[in-house]
């Protein structure tokens, strides 16, 4: 599922906001009596989940790079 199929506001949303949206969709799916009506919501939830996962992985990579750079700086200072 491609990110470009999601609304543009997902791009600007934080992980917390996206998680709240996913939880909202889950609640509506749980309350839906007719499962035939829930197909679109389920598809949106799958796309949103994929987007959240990719956004989380990018954030994790950024944190890891920052941490590694700080560790390298500390090691350089200690070598002097």
Image (spheres, rainbow, N blue to C red):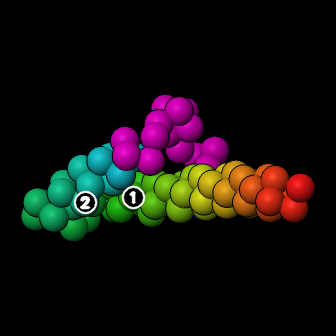
Does residue 10 appear in the picture of this structure? yes
**Which region shows up in magenta?**
3-17
Q: Which mark is residue 45?
A: 1
User: In this orientation, which residue lies closer to the viewer: 77 or 56?
Assistant: 77
Q: Which residue is drawn at 58% across and 46% down?
A: 5
Callout 2 secondary element: helix
Q: Decide: few, some or many residues near mark 1? Use Cα within 10 Å; few <14, some 14-19, many ≥20.
A: some
Residue 58 percent across, percent down from the top left = 65, 55
Q: Quadrant of the C terminus?
A: bottom right
Q: Residue at x 54, y 57 (%)?
A: 56
Q: Residue 24 carries which label?
A: none
Q: Decide: few, some or many residues near mark 2? Use Cα within 10 Å; few <14, some 14-19, many ≥20.
A: some
Residue 13 percent across, percent down from the top left = 47, 36
Question: Distance of mark 1 from mark 2, alpha carbons?
Answer: 8 Å
State which quadrant residue 42 falls in.
bottom left
Callout 1 secondary element: helix
Q: Where is mark 2, residue-wise?
A: 26
State which quadrant residue 29 falls in.
bottom left
Residue located farthest toward the front when viewing the structure as drawn: 80
Circles 1 and 2 in contact, beta carbons < 8 Å:
yes
User: In this orientation, which residue lies closer to the viewer: 27 or 67?
Assistant: 67
Residue 77 part of the magenta segment: no
Residue 28 percent across, percent down from the top left = 19, 54
Q: Is residue 51 left or right of residue 42?
A: right
């Amino acid at each position: 599922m491609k990110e470009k199929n999601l609304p543009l506001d997902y791009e600007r949303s934080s992980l917390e906001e996206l998680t709240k949206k996913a939880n909202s969709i889950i609640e509506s799916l749980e309350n839906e009596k007719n499962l035939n009506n829930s197909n679109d919501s389920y598809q949106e939830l799958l796309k949103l989940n994929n987007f959240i996962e990719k956004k989380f992985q990018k954030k994790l990579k950024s944190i890891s790079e920052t941490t590694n750079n700080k560790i390298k700086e500390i090691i350089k200072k200690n070598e002097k």
